[in-house]
Image (cartoon, coloured by chain):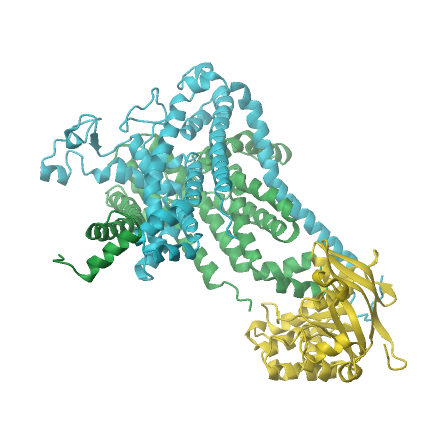
Chain colours: A yellow, B green, C cyan
Amino acid sequence: MLQENNLENIITTKDLSVFYGTTQAIHKINLNIPRNRITAIIGPSGCGKSTLIRCFNRMNDLVPSARVDGEVVYSDQNIYGTEVDPVHIRRQIGMVFQKPNPFPKSVYENIAFGAKINNYKGNMDELVEKSLRQAALWDEVKDELDKSGLALSGGQQQRLCIARALATEPELILMDEPASALDPIATLKIEELMQDLKEQYTIIIVTHNMQQASRASDYTAFISIDRTRIEERVGVLVEYDQTSKIFVNPAEKETEDYISGRFG
Amino acid sequence: MRLGKSTADIFDRRLSQATSLPGKPKWSKLKEKWIARILFFCGFFSVLVTIGIIISLFSEAVGFFLRPEVSIFKFFTGTTWRPLLKTVSPDNFGVLPLITGTLLIAVISALISVPIGLGSAIYLSEYSSDRLRSILKPILEILAGIPSVVYGYFALSFITPLIKTIFEIWLGLEVGFFNALSAAVVLGIMIIPTVASISEDAMRAVPRSLREAAYSLGATKFEAVSKVIVPAALSGITAAFILAISRAVGETMAVTIAAGATPQVTLNPLKSVQTMTSFIVQVSFGDAPAGSINGQSIFAVGATLFTMTFIMNVISDFVLNKFREVYE
Amino acid sequence: MIQSKKEQFRENLEKRHSAAKFFYFLLLICLLIGFFTLSVLIIDLAIEGGPWLRSQLFTNYHSRKPEEAGMKSAIFGSLINLGLTGLFSFPLGVGAAIYLEEYAPKNKLTSFINININNLAGVPSIVYGMLGLVVFGRMFGLFAPDSWLVQLLNLPVGKGALGGLQFNLFNIPWLEIRLPFGRTILAGGLTMTMLILPVVIIASREAIRSVPNSIRDAAYALGATKWQMISTQVLPIAFPGILTGIILSLSRAIGETAPLIIMGAFTYVPFLPESLWDQFTVMPIQIYNWITLPQAEYRVHLAAAGIIVLLAVLLSLNAIAVFLRKKFEIHWS
């Protein structure tokens, strides 16, 4: 895949495969995710995009039947190595979910949560404000930090979740279809936010929405079902390149079929 | 009264033909009506039971309070309960010792049943595998099914000697053979399954997305449970707590066997006390005649007991429903 | 360890993980307490009561000589009481459940009935004893010689111990009725029925509710009346669940002591009740009696043996309920 010159990779997968029990979800995926860029993962539903992204912060560990083969390398270490503590990883890699899931606590407490459990010694008020500003939510809630997170609108809740993830000062932010439960205006806000965030952070976003991927991302990975064993529905990496290339002149026919809406 | 053929008759006949019953349309409609009436009576019967309870308790209680030897004010404020004394005077019918005895045991038992029940529920809902749960839940159910008398026996044969060992021999305190602590411990164990079951339901109701959010922020399991899940299930857990006390207040045989029959106002659980329920049982064993003062006193105590548990149950329901957390 | 680049997050991972482990350990202790109690109880019962599980326990009545004491009348009384309770609670409970699930309109009365049933389920069992005493045992004193009813209707009530009104229904010799019911096994059965009724209703409702609506629709479409639909389709399907609920309620009833004491069951019954109007005792009362006697043979050994018998009956009832549930479970595809 073509990469801009002198671009550092933040996280890399090597022959990454995931099994749930005896069923395989994804097969030997190799990806280098560049730092300070937005990488989109697209593909038809049920191909393992969520499974893939959840490998990056070891959220698959929470599923008892999940088994991971291959490596995920972050900071020169395989995060699935035996000496690595998933709790530690998850502080450095933040996640935003498809449906906004703020805690039933105040806005302030939501943001402070991650910092508190990690024994943050700095000024909490500053951290909360900084995170809310970065998530473009500060002006809307600054006078109501005690309000329950659940009292916000859907779009605001999702930005709250982003602010919450930012509060632990991660390097990498994973977003699993963050706007699919939101209206178009809220979606646009999130996309603008992502562009602002990419200066400081790296973002990997799973999305169903191809317009979103082509608008908002720098690189795109297309995951689809392994054609050699269609009934098993195993996800493989079909193509991975700069977004401009994927959407204008894809190398694989399968990619082109998907993008033009012929299937998926 | 239907005269001659009407559409109703024809329809009914078709009906009975279709269902191949000997057609007697008028009979079948009448039958349906009466069945509905009988079933309504069955449904309404429970209301009659409640009315029956209220009338039984309160009519006799009122009869008790109308007696010249009893003063309703002294009943609720007096600290001496000596109903069997020859000199019958209002001073001997102060119910506070029974209430404090009941509450002392109930509160201590809740201090045991709530943490342990909650802990069991947390383990079952957050930590255990399905296979382990299928072994542990039946154990809790068995614990819940053991009759109160058996717990009373367990108190005397195991718990009381244990308490005596700990408090008398090791700590040098005075421990009566019948003591409130023994009853409270056994009651606590008895109520663990109730608390565990309600708390587990409350925690299962917390959506998975909240757990995922907590873990994705880098929380350990303990942090996720203590700072997100349990607070999110708090209304259910509070309801479980109130219910635990309510059940403990209403329990009879285990406390009667273990705590003795010494009505006294005390906060010392190592002494013997008497609860409202064990007083009622004590009198019932004694064959007091129907209209006698003791025969009626049990209804005054019973009415007090019923009111207390009723209020607690209502509060528990209220907490459960009004404060049910909205997650989305 | 992957190095964290932000010093302000002094993560204390080790401390947090130890806290997590300690918490897990505490949780295990919570679980073990229940398990531990059961084990100690079973072992204690086996040791103290096992050797006393002899035939005398089942063939003899209570006696002043411990070696000859048994719980024959208590076992018999418990079983009769159980049978009566089941007999009365089945139609009342299932009828109420059918009404509430199939007939009741959504109005204030129905929700009142619902709230009422839930409240009754939480009333202490001793209160049901007092209900039984006044309503069934004494019948509000309506049949005492000096009551207004007796005076008004000039009823021929007897005086003294066998007081109250006695007559034969429709003049059939063996269909004797006595009012009030007094301290008899009939009153005991009725008292326990009141106690378990709320739970029977709740369990039966669940069983009826689990019958899919498609079955009801199919029956109606074939022209069945409401009762035909219920009696021929819904009830047979819901029956195992209902039966399980009743058996589980009965297994709770068999261990109840206080309500029966209050309502007037006796402690010492040296005969087997032969009619509904006889005095009676039940196993938990006999066990309680033994626990309170000073001699160790009674309060430790016989009590333990009695408890073993009681728990055996209880366990059998539960096992039957579980077996029935598994056997008749319908798996809707």
Examine the image and state in which quarter residue A201 appears.
Answer: bottom right
Tell me, yes or no, if residue A220 can be seen here: yes
> Observer-nearest residue: A53 or A10?
A53
Can you name the residue that lies furthest to the right here? A6
Q: Give the x, y percent position of residue A170.
A: 76, 72
Q: Give the x, y percent position of residue C323.
A: 50, 37
Q: Give the x, y percent position of residue A257.
A: 72, 77
> Observer-nearest residue: B186 or C325?
C325
Q: Is residue C14 left or right of residue B265?
A: right
Q: Give the x, y percent position of residue B171.
A: 63, 36
Examine the image and state in which quarter residue A66 appears.
Answer: bottom right
> Observer-nearest residue: A214 or B62?
A214
Q: Is residue C162 left or right of residue C300?
A: left
Question: Which quadrant, please, contains the N terminus of chain C?
Answer: bottom right
Compared to B261, does A192 lie above or below?
below
At 51% from the left edge and 44% from the top edge, which residue is drawn? B191
Tell me, yes or no, if residue C11 can be seen here: no
Compared to C235, does A67 lie above or below?
below
Image mark count: 0
At 72% from the left edge and 62% from the top edge, which residue is drawn? A59
